[in-house]
Amino acid sequence: MVFILWIIYRPKTVRAHVTAVFPSVFTLTSNSTLVYNFTLHVSIQNPNRKVGLYYDDISAEAQYDSIPFGLVYKFPPFFQHKRNITVFPLVFVGRAFGLRSVQKKFEREKREGWFYVELKICTKMRLKIEFVKVGRYSPEIDCAVKLPVMANGSDVKFERSECDVDKF
């Protein structure tokens, strides 16, 4: 049954982008503690004409030099209608200790004006085809975000980041 519905409706993979960044703090202290406070706006697009999406679970993790430092856990479940874009904020606030290994990379990126942060979003979803909910999918969304260095009084420029979606 599921295979027949899949063949008939041919659901397309969602698309995701980081559309805005609002940094306020991203610094490495002298004792190798990363202090961070920033918000990323992520848009997820459902490109399907005949398929709605139930997101049962969404969690996000930020990484710097492949070291996890921030976790946003458990967004409330929601339904995404056909051919719809949903934008939601991911707020990362906290401290990560013992990051001595990233000191050189941090200083280099600070001089360049951008910090390269990886964003990993894990989801659990189901498809809604007509009146039927089918399948259980766990797509993973990976985004490479260029977090601008905050300079005193300067305008923050941001480059929209396209994300990779796997396992749909």
Image (cartoon, grey):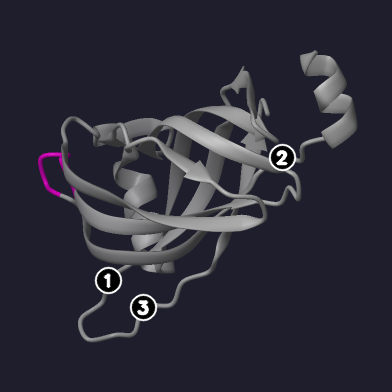
Secondary structure beneath dot 2 equals: loop
Q: Nearer the viewer, residue 127 or 58?
A: 127
CA gap between label 3 and label 1 equals 7 Å
Tag of residue 39: none
Which numbered disc flags the more N-terminal residue, 2 or 1? 2
Name which residue type carries label 3: Val
User: Taking 98 as reference, is 139 left or right?
Assistant: right
Q: Quadrant of residue 98?
A: top left
**Residue 120 against residue 116 in the figure, above or below:** above
Question: Which range is magenta?
Answer: 29-35
User: Taking 138 as reference, is 62 left or right?
Assistant: left
Which numbered disc flags the more N-terminal residue, 2 or 3? 2
Magenta stretch encompasses residue 59: no
Secondary structure beneath dot 1 equals: loop
Name which residue type carries label 1: Met
**Are the residues at dot 2 and dot 1 in contact (C-beta closer than 8 Å)?**
no
The residue where tag 2 is placed is: 13
Q: Position of residue 88 (x, y in %)?
A: 39, 54
Which numbered disc flags the more N-terminal residue, 3 or 1? 1
The residue where tag 3 is placed is: 156
Q: Quadrant of the C terminus?
A: top right
Number of the front mark, 2 or 3: 2
User: Taking 67 as reference, is 92 left or right?
Assistant: left
Name which residue type carries label 2: Thr
**Are the residues at dot 3 and dot 1 in contact (C-beta closer than 8 Å)?**
yes
Q: Position of residue 20 (x, y in %)?
A: 43, 66
Please tell me how crowded label 2 is: few (under 14), some (14-19), or many (20+) other residues with Cα within 10 Å. Answer: some
Q: Quadrant of residue 85?
A: bottom right
The residue where tag 1 is placed is: 150
